[in-house]
Amino acid sequence: MRKVYWGYAANENLSNEELIRENYQGIRPAPGYPACPEHTEKGTIWQLLDVEAHTA
């Protein structure tokens, strides 16, 4: 997503381990954190992902 839609490092080719270690350019938006301080969207995200049906 970050390479195709956001235009970060289009030629980058990182391994899964490098991705897990966050060795990539770009933003890491998350509700409730400075990049996305709005907490009210958490409920919408929870519903869209159908979290209760996909977690134990």
Image: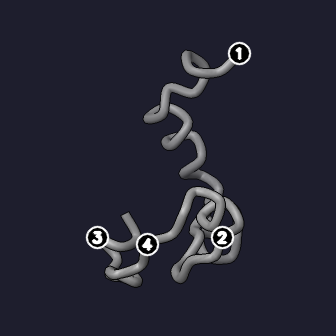
- The answer to whether residue 50 is above or below residue 4 is above
Q: Residue at x 55, y 16 (%)?
A: 53
- Report the number of numbered marks: 4
Give amino acid for label 4. Answer: Asn
Nearer the camera: disc 4 or disc 3: 4
Question: Alpha-carbon distance for marks 1 and 2?
Answer: 27 Å
Sequence-wise, the earlier of marks 3 and 2 is: 3
Q: Position of residue 6 (x, y in %)?
A: 34, 76
Question: Alpha-carbon distance for marks 1 and 4?
Answer: 34 Å
Which of the labelled discs sits on residue 56, or is there none?
1
Question: Alpha-carbon distance for marks 3 and 2?
Answer: 18 Å
Q: Secondary structure at mark 1?
A: loop
Label 4, on which residue? 13
Give amino acid for label 1. Answer: Ala
> Is residue 56 or residue 41 the one in the foreground?
56
Q: Position of residue 29 (x, y in %)?
A: 57, 68
Q: Is residue 2 left or right of residue 41?
A: left
Label 3, on which residue? 4
Which of the labelled discs sits on residue 22, or is there none?
2
- The answer to whether residue 42 is above or below residue 34 is above
**Tags 3 and 1 in contact by the CB under 8 Å rule?**
no
